[in-house]
Amino acid sequence: MKENKEELLEMLEKMLEIREFESSVQQYFAEGQIPGFVHLYLGEEAIAVGACSALKEDDYITSTHRGHGHLLAKGGDVKKMMAEIFGKVTGYNRGKGGSMHIADVSLGILGANGIVGAGLPIAAGSGISSQINGTDAVTVCFFGDGASNRGTFHETLNMASVWNLPIVFVCENNMYGISMPQYQSDGRKGQNIKDVADRAVGYGISGITIDGNDVLAVNEAVNEAVKKARSNGGPSLIECKTYRWRGHFEGDPTNYRDDEELEEWKKKDPIKKFSSFLLDEEIITEKEFKQIKDKIKEKVEEATKFAQESAEPSPDDVTNNVYFEEVE
Amino acid sequence: MKNLTYAEALREAMAEEMEKDSSVFIMGEDVGVFGGCFGVTGDLVQRFGEDRVRDTPITETAIVGGAVGAAMTGSRPIAELMFASFMGVAMDEVFNQAAKMCYMTGGQAKVPMVLRTPVGGGIGAAAQHSVCNESWVVGIPGLKVVLPSTPADAKGLLKSAIRDDNPVIFFEHKVLYETKGEVPEEDYTIPLGKADIKREGDDATIIATGMFVRKALEAADQLAKEGIELEVIDPRSLVPLDKETILASVDKTGRAIIATEETKRGSFASEVAAVISEEGLYSLEAPILRVCSEDTPVPFSTVLEQAYLPSTEDIITAVKSSL
Ligand SMILES: Cc1ncc(C[n+]2csc(CCOP(=O)(O)OP(=O)(O)O)c2C)c(N)n1
Ligand SMILES: [Mg+2]
């Protein structure tokens, strides 16, 4: 566990930043200011933050269609992210990518991804690079419960295991892949096991299931797995149980789940859980907590303003970047 | 006649075929209670049950491969891929399994399956959800390929595709799903391999597919005001291709413009151009032109996506340059 106050506060700030960021995206999407579609991370903040707090700047992550939280937690710039989601030229991808494709390669963020399960083999690749180049960089590979039904999950865990690749596979089990329940005793289900972590045994790696709404639990588990990976101990699978508060995408009617289930999970709000702990243990005061919240709100508001006021890309840009060119 | 959306027409085709033939079933991601990502399967799970409208895990490889196996063993699967961009995940099943099974087995095995999937940009879905990948499949022997532009065509062609004893890649354009049109009341089918002349004219021929049939018709309306009469041909099925209708029209007008949403290089549009130049060169009074998307991935920002996609104006410019 993170012992020092500064680190604990950093985690709290990141979680609040993601919450605030996603709430703004929700609002501006509803107002029609954001094109395309967005998948929000609200309710799952503890996983990205717990995991990325265990990483150094030169470690890698691979992300998903629900990637805003991962990217912010790995240090993504709030302004450039928001601008990309608005499709502006000042965005990370110059407006070419949008919500599902944001990347900051310089921070080891190998990209959100529109193809479910596509991040897994890419994580194998960054793991191979660490071996080939003799660095101690570790890759955290985020993916959903639904993604763990794709061949890429199975093929990558197998390869990572036999080659002892330095990867931490972080499965965000939010209980659904769009409308498909991960598991239920009767009826439709994506898989016939309650815990995705059970699959690790088939590949000869360690697999554990933890409370994904407990940032300290996530941090502790990922820290340990990262340490192991850095010291040549190979890959691990960590399944984090959580719940997405919003629909699969904004506009999803969510006719496949009950409001009561959502209400139950809202009681397990990861931010509330962590902030209550910090307050109860007198690690922070109410006043400090409020100051942090105000600061984050301002930061995200500024980012939104930046995004709104930024220029659209020029139509001529459409044909740039198809092939790589070195920029001075 | 009744007025249906493209999505409703597709649903009717599936429902009617499922009622008639108990070996027809549907499988895909979120096709059940969710009703399909674009609402095409709708209430079919309530009508036909979870055995015949099967929600799958996220597993495109097994959806398409499973359809091949089911088709080889007496079923008539309709597999749905949520976006045509995801076909990459199941490309072996399309290319090496579905397409070649009949030939490789010396004609023993039949693979009567339909793979339904939406193509196309225009909704800000960005690079991995917007492809028009007709060219991935039109060159694969053993597949039939369809892309309807109207509700009536969608229904009649899907019924033929389901009844066909061969694998049919059935592309749908996602921007068309909510468009409405007249659909016959009675039971009907439209044969694969028969083009439709959507508008008659003498001055130039536009061969257009999917969303671009609408753009070509808009262009024709505008040009008619200037006294230029376009003939708009929708091949509807890309394989088999109704060369006869295309070549006869080009012979009449002397001009051929092919308008599709695909990226230009190596496109279905290129294939049509090749057919016209091989078999209709002496009918031509101007070079064949292709109006297609930029050779780039589909960009996200609305400004860039509009720059990527050809417009009605681009079709008009092409026509004028060929006159
Ligand atoms: C290969 C592929 N198949 C299907 C989809 C459509 N799709 C997008 S997200 C999603 C559900 C993903 O579920 P999960 O992995 O559990 O992640 P979650 O959305 O719950 O975070 C699906 C089916 C896709 N993008 N890529
Ligand atoms: Mg999920």
Image (tube, rainbow, N blue to C red):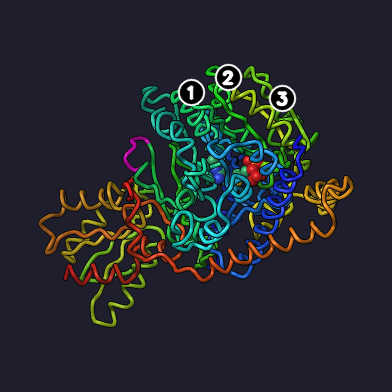
Q: Residues within 10 Å of mark 3 (few under 14, many from 20)?
A: some
Looking at the picture, how far across and down is residue A274, in whole percent?
80, 46
Q: Is residue A154 above or below residue B257?
A: above
Looking at the rendered structure, the kind of residue marked 2 is: Asn
Marks 3 & 2 on one chain: yes
Judging by the rendered image, the residue that carries numbered circle 3 is A198
Residue B30 seen by the camera: no
Quarter holding residue B109 = top left
Judging by the rendered image, the residue that carries numbered circle 1 is A131
Tell which subunit mark 3 falls on: A
- Dot 2 beta carbon under 8 Å from ligand 1: no
The residue positioned 59% from the left and 42% from the top of the image is B28
Q: In front: A135, or B121?
A: A135
Q: Which residues are magenta?
A: B138-142
Looking at the picture, how far across and down is residue B234, in whole percent?
34, 59
Judging by the rendered image, the residue that carries numbered circle 2 is A232
For residue B317, side relative to residue A273 (left or right) = left
Q: In front: B14, or B119?
A: B119
Question: Of tags 3 and 1, which is closer to the observer?
Answer: 1
Mark-to-mark CA distance, 3 and 2: 23 Å
Secondary-structure class at tag 3: helix
Tell which subunit mark 2 falls on: A
